[in-house]
Image (tube, helix red, strand yellow):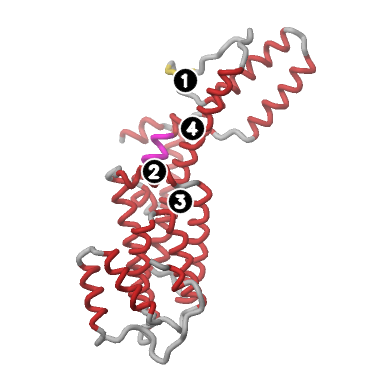
Amino acid sequence: MNIKLLQGKLAISENPGIKSTDPRFDKIVSLVEQGKYIEAAESCEIVIKDEIYDIRLICYFLYGYWLKQGLISLGEVINSLDYIVLNNWEAVGPAKRRKQNFQNSLGWIFRQLLKKIQYEETKNTELWQKWQASVSTEELNKMLQASEAFRLSTSKQLEEDTESVVVSSKIDNWLRSLQRLVSARRESEQVETEKNELNATEINTAIPKLTFKVAGSNIEVSYHMELLLNKLAAFEYLLEEEKFSRAALLADDINQTLADFDPMIYFPKTFEPFIRLKALNFEELSTYEDHRESSQWEVMQDWLKTDLDSFTNN
């Protein structure tokens, strides 16, 4: 499928949109109702090639395109919608009740996108695993930027926050959660590689190794944390040996590390359940975002700060 059909200036006709008497429209709607989204998209592409631009068919086409191309194409799909809203508003029909048709169709495609990604993640499908393994944090960031631009354009053109704007925000939350998971995964892989390389070349020293414990339990730490603990031990060792110039250099290095300290990098296994559960339940959790400024939220925060056990168990 050729998404570039929608990525330029579209020709404006006297009465844009597909005619209600066109049998292709009923056929496409039937395919969509049967869940045959890729087949529907292929049929929509034929209509679009005839320079018939209808927001309903455009959204059917873009959803099928996304299903076929995968998560990586989400930014491209959203950018195409953004360009249509900004630059091809008059070229896309139906002209009658245009604003309402745009609201309905944009709401439909973003609901479908959200439903699909939630299903794949909740079921922990092979496709979900593929998404995690194949997408990069940089690519996810481009998707987030595209989504933000789309919300601004849509709110301006439609003069209100539509369903598509609300749902796209939920998709953004999911993308950010996935971004953190991918980042943690890449970091873990990189650290493991660096650790293996270091172990192959590093000569053991007399600096004592430290064990990190909290409340009597060992916490699995990353290579970065192990390195920091070794630096702390090395700092003590250098002071005992009165090697002050080296101790000062090491102290400066440790201070820089602490200034940029990120717990998720130093304790990835500890935070992994938290990140994963937030991703799996992000829709339910996001419903409470508007409560943060309320008095009840502040009281609940005070309770949490004073007694975690009571807050959790009552």
Viewer-nearest residue: 108 or 91:
91
For mark 4, what is the residue?
189
For mark 2, what is the residue?
278
Distance (Cα) linking label 2 and label 3: 17 Å
Q: Residues within 10 Å of mark 3 (few under 14, many from 20)?
A: few
Q: Residues within 10 Å of mark 4 (few under 14, many from 20)?
A: few
Q: Of circles 1 and 2, which is in front? A: 2
Q: Of circles 3 and 4, which is in front? A: 4
Q: Is residue 91 above or below residue 183?
A: below
- Amino acid at circle 1: Val
Q: Quadrant of the C terminus?
A: top left
Which badge, 2 or 4, is on the more N-terminal residue?
Answer: 4
Distance (Cα) linking label 2 and label 4: 22 Å
Which badge, 3 or 4, is on the more N-terminal residue?
Answer: 4
- Amino acid at circle 3: Arg
Magenta highlight range: 272-279
Indicate the secondary structure of the residue bearing disc 2.
helix
For mark 1, what is the residue?
214
- Residue 276, percent from left and from top: 38, 40
> Is 270 one of the magenta-colored residues?
no
Q: Of circles 2 and 4, which is in front? A: 4
Q: Is residue 179 above or below residue 194?
A: below
For the question of whether residue 177 can be seen, the reply is no
Look at 23% across and 82% down and name the residue there: 23
**Which mark identifies residue 3?**
none
The residue furthest right is: 245
